Amino acid sequence: MKKLIQIMCLALVFVAAVSCGGKKVRLTDGEWRLESMHADDETFVLMDKNPSITFSDTSNMVHGYGGCNNYFGNYEVRNGNKISISTLGSTLAMCPQIDTEDLFLHILSNATSYKISGSELILYDTLDKKIANFTLIRNK
C-alpha cells in the first residue's frame, strides 16, 4: 500500500510539472500590438489604432499595420535573440499619423535584438536601448 501511494504521488508530481510548465511564447506565435516606442530619449504612446507586427513562421516575412498603412518586409533571427527587419514597404495612403508611422517603420529597421517575457515583446537597438514594446494580442 505504501509503495502504491509513493507511485501515485510521483505520478501526480510528474503530471503537475508537465501541465504547469507553460508554453514558451515565440516570435512567430501571433500578432503583436505596439504599446510604446522610444526614440531620441522620448517615449511615444500611440494612436487610436496601435500599429502591429506579425512574423511568419513559414518564411522570413513580416507584415502588419503601421498606424495608417499596411506594411511588409523581411526579417532574420540569428544567434537566439539577434534580429534584423529589412526591405520594408507599405501601401501609400496619407493620413494625419503618417509621421508616427514613419517613425515606427524606422524603429523596426533599427532593431538588432529582442526579448520575449510572458506576452511582451521588446525590441532593442545596437546600443541595447529599448526601442519598442509590443503585447501579444492574437495567438495563431
Image (cartoon, helix red, strand yellow):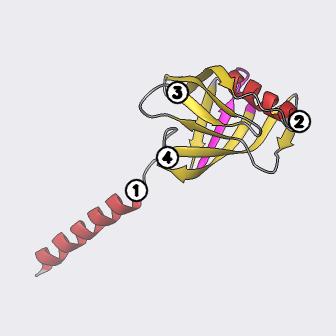
Q: Which residues are magenta?
A: 119-130
Residue at (22, 67) in percent of width and height: 11
* Mark 2, secondary structure of its residue: strand
* Mark 1, secondary structure of its residue: loop
Sequence order check, earlier mark of 2 and 1? 1
The CA distance from mark 4 to mark 1 is 12 Å
Q: Which mark is residue 25?
A: 4
Q: Which amino acid type corresponds to the residue marked 2 in the rendered image? A: Glu
Q: Nearer the viewer, residue 112 or 94?
A: 94
Residue 107 appears anywhere in the view = yes
In the picture of the structure, the residue carrying the numbered disc 3 is: 61
Q: Which amino acid type corresponds to the residue marked 4 in the rendered image? A: Val
Residue at (55, 52) in percent of width and height: 138
The CA distance from mark 3 to mark 1 is 30 Å
In the picture of the structure, the residue carrying the numbered disc 2 is: 42
How packed mark 2 is, by other alpha carbons closer than 10 Å (few <14, some 14-19, many 20 or more), is few
* Mark 4, secondary structure of its residue: loop
Indicate the quadrant containing the N terminus: top left, top right, bottom left or bottom right: bottom left
Mark whose residue sits in front, 3 or 2: 3
Q: Which mark is residue 1?
A: none
* 42 on left or right of 22: right
How packed mark 3 is, by other alpha carbons closer than 10 Å (few <14, some 14-19, many 20 or more), is some
Mark whose residue sits in front, 2 or 1: 2
Residue at (73, 35) in percent of width and height: 69
The CA distance from mark 2 to mark 4 is 28 Å
